[in-house]
């Protein structure tokens, strides 16, 4: 029988790749969508006619009950969040409500309406923050460094708690940074690839950046949504770290992106304190051994391939718009 999935955050980067994956697998896909004055469907324009949208918001419990009721899902993927770390210092309460308590809202809707649905929570390597061990794995204690990280720790533990309290099939995927041409332009990878393309085409003169020494474990979003699906196909619910097992500095990212377009990044990058965070996560490096062994998950796209893919995509988009 056709499987049914409800995705919150379907208009975001991961929602779009996950929807593609589930449609390819023959799922009936429902997407929770917030009301906006103009539709933001850029990431899912190509598949929008295959998705059944349900209006709702993680802050509005009634709308979530309605969404679970209409979709009667076998699987629920909670990808919705205020997901930008920088904004979480400017809107800490909203971030706590959406990214943290919002998880309880959707878990409650599932518990009340369709308790046998399998549930995926989009947890984050930001929970490790000021890391207490390297590499970070499922057993590494959390030490979040931003209101976003703090909210994600709440979301993680409430997911574990619903699994233990109500015997729900609830999984928490602790995903390290993952990127793609569909990444929001304020995140560092896309900010850099977009700027490099603009500078190459003479549309921008400089790139203002924050801390170039931060290190991240960056993978490709298309590979990471496969891990989300795999978690919900197992016999038992569990938590998994999803990462590449490699770390790179922001400076390396800049070098590769500009170098790919034969530009010397030092001629264009300006450090601007505005982009330096009140508390930084200096180093993230994940250990994906458990996911590789238990889920059979593997990566297809490496770091350099990811960055050049994003540069090429931004360049093409800008050339087409000229
Ligand atoms: P994203 O592109 O920022 O997408 C976030 C989605 O959440 C958007 O569809 C957004 O809708 C929706 N949303 C925001 N507030 C909402 C609300 N109050 N009610 C309902 N929907 C709301 O994020 P992403 O990169 O795809 O990440 C997906 C999830 O994984 C997020 O929970 C993020 O925190 C988490 N995560 C991401 C990474 C990563 O590296 N990408 C790593 C670990 C964890 P609009 O389009 O209407 O704004
Ligand atoms: O920053 C540094 C910045 O904003 C990466 C989200 O998806 O991944 C993401 O969170 C690093 C940080 O992502 C700029 O200080 C330097 O050290 O791309 P980012 P993030 O904060 O790691 C995790 C796993 C999530 O869960 C989140 O949802 O880059 N950096 N200069 C800069 N960052 C930005 N954005 N802009 C700069 O100019």
Image (cartoon, rainbow, N blue to C red):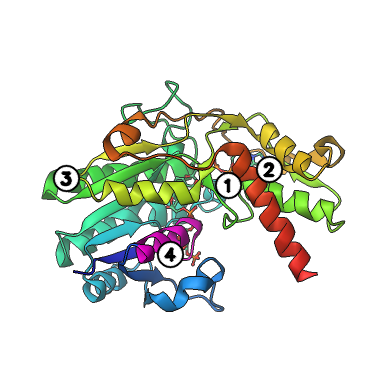
- Beta carbon at label 2 within 8 Å of ligand 2: yes
- Judge depth for marks 1 and 3 and give the one in front: 3
Mark 1 and mark 2 lie on one chain; the one further toward the N terminus is: 1
Which image quarter: residue 282?
top right
Disc 3 on helix, strand or loop?
loop
Q: Is residue 153 left or right of residue 129?
A: left
Question: Can you identify the residue that label 3 sits on?
Answer: 235
Which region is colored magenta? 11-24
Q: Residues within 10 Å of mark 1 (few under 14, many from 20)?
A: some
- Judge depth for marks 1 and 4 and give the one in front: 4
C-alpha span from label 1 to label 3: 38 Å
Callout 1–callout 2 Cβ contact below 8 Å: yes
167 in the magenta segment: no
Q: Residues within 10 Å of mark 4 (few under 14, many from 20)?
A: many
- Which disc, if any, is residue 86? 1
C-alpha span from label 3 to label 4: 26 Å
- Which disc, if any, is residue 275? 2
C-alpha span from label 2 to label 4: 28 Å
- Depth order, front residue of 193/109: 193
Residue displayed at 29% across by 65% down: 5
Q: Position of residue 129 (x, y in %)?
A: 47, 32
């Amino acid at each position: 029988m056709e499987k049914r999935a409800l995705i919150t955050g379907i208009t975001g980067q991961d929602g779009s790749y996950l929807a593609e994956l589930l449609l390819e697998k023959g799922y009936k896909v429902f997407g929770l969508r917030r009301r906006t004055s103009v539709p933001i469907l850029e990431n899912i324009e190509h598949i929008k006619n295959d998705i059944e949208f349900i209006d709702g918001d993680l802050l509005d419990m009634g709308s979530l009950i309605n969404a679970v009721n209409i979709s009667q899902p076998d699987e629920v993927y909670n990808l919705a969040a205020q997901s930008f770390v920088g904004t979480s210092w400017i809107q800490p309460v909203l971030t706590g409500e959406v990214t943290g308590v919002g998880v309880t809202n959707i878990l409650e809707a599932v518990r009340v309406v369709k308790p046998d649905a399998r549930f995926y929570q989009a947890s984050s390597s930001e929970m490790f923050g000021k890391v207490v061990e390297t590499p970070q794995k499922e057993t590494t204690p959390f030490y979040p460094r931003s209101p976003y990280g703090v909210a994600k720790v709440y979301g993680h533990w409430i997911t574990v708690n619903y699994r233990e309290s109500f015997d729900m099939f609830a999984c928490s995927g602790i995903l390290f940074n993952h990127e793609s041409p569909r990444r929001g332009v304020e995140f560092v990878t896309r900010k850099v690839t977009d700027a490099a393309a603009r500078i190459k085409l003479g549309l921008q003169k400089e790139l203002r950046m924050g801390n170039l020494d931060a290190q991240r474990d960056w993978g490709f979003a298309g590979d990471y949504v496969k891990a989300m699906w795999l978690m919900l196909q197992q016999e038992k619910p569990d938590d998994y770290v999803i990462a590449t097992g490699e770390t790179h500095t922001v400076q390396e990212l800049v070098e590769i992106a500009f170098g790919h377009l034969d530009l010397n990044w030092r001629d264009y990058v300006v450090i601007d304190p505005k982009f330096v965070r009140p508390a930084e996560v200096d180093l993230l490096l994940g250990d994906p051994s458990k996911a590789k062994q238990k889920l059979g998950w593997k990566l297809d796209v490496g770091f350099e391939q990811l960055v050049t893919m994003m540069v090429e995509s931004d360049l093409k988009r800008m050339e087409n718009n000229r």
